[in-house]
Image (cartoon, rainbow, N blue to C red):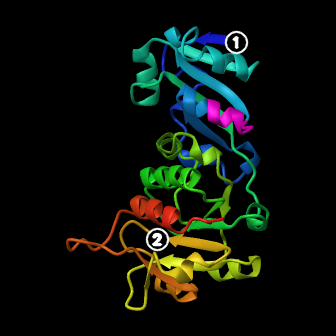
Amino acid sequence: MEIIEIKSPEHPGVEVFSTLTEAQLRNRIEPDKGIFIAESPKVIKVALDAGYEPLALLCERRHITGDAAEIIKRCGDIPVYTGDREILAGLTGYTLTRGVLCAMRRPKDRKVEDICRTARRIVVIDGVVDTTNIGAIFRSAAALGIDAVLLTPNSCDPLNRRAVRVSMGSVFLVPWTWLDGGIASLGSLGFSTAAMALTDDSIPIDSPTLASVQRLAIVMGTEGDGLPEETISQADYVVRIPMSHGVDSLNVAAAAAVAFWELRAKG
């Protein structure tokens, strides 16, 4: 462990916490060199427990022997950058509410068939771009029995800093990967698909028909427009959540939580 005192936001080595954009951190050109940022001791601990590789830490000086002490010990021989709260706020653009950031190595993308091999309930996130919603969906998925998460390429990266923070580390608890093909391809893996959408031929989420499905992929659409017509047409079922008081729909994260609980595998 090397404690490095930083005196300015331009200190060599700290650009990973400040000037690099999310796209640069992800490094699509050289994915093996991709990085993401985990924030707060609790979230970092979940990532370490899940086997993620730490590369560097940034924390307030007072946390070195406080909240970050266990994390620093577990991370081994990596640089630990520290300084006054004002310096760190200038570096990151905001005050560190939990005082610790950890740069970690991105894992290699996994194959859909590998993470779905033994799954009974999975969710497909189609075009959701809001980081808060992505984080909230992952947290509900981990809590409510979803075995794997698939995302279309036009969805937000689950390892976006804010998504990780909102999920409270749940992105490290549920296997996930990118779905390049349409949902029809999931049939070859043994899944029936349930598109969450408000259509004239949709069935209520508590339909006994859905309860009897052994392997189910729940498909959630974007915050505004919902699922594309093409995706809905490919689904085995179109499912709605019955509403009261004239409310037409729920936020995608709230709808996901309802769907995960109601459609969970039983027995």
Residue 90 percent across, percent down from the top left: 41, 23
Say whether residue 49 is magenta: yes
Q: Is residue 196 left or right of residue 266?
A: left
What is the quadrant of the C terminus in the image? bottom right
Q: From the viewer's perspective, is 49 left or right of 218? A: right
Q: What element carries label 1?
A: strand
Image location of residue 208, percent across then percent down: 52, 81
Q: Residue shown at 46%/79% (left/top)?
A: 239
Q: Which of 98 and 155 is in front in this view?
A: 98
In the rendered image, residue 113 lying in the magenta stretch gets the answer no
Amino acid type assigned to the residue bearing label 1 in the image = Glu
Where is residue 212? Give x, y as percent. Answer: 61, 79
The secondary structure making up most of the magenta span is helix
Cα distance between the residues tagged 1 and 2? 45 Å
59 relative to 149 in the view: left or right: left
Q: What stretch is highlighted in magenta?
A: 45-52
Disc marking residue 184? none
Tag 1–tag 2 contact (CB < 8 Å)? no
Q: Which residue is drawn at 68% across and 19% down?
A: 79
Secondary structure under tag 2 reads loop
* Residue 2 - label: 1
Residue 226 at x, y = what percent?
Answer: 41, 74
Query: What residue is pinned by disc 2?
Result: 221
Determine the residue positioned at 70% across, 82% down.
Answer: 187
Instruction: Please tell me whether mark 1 or mark 2 is closer to you in this view.
Output: 2
- The quarter of the picture where the N terminus appears is top right
- Judge whether 148 appears above or below 48 on screen: below
Tell whether 73 sits left or right of 94.
right
Q: For residue 80, what is the image quadrant?
A: top right
Residue 150 figure quarter: bottom right
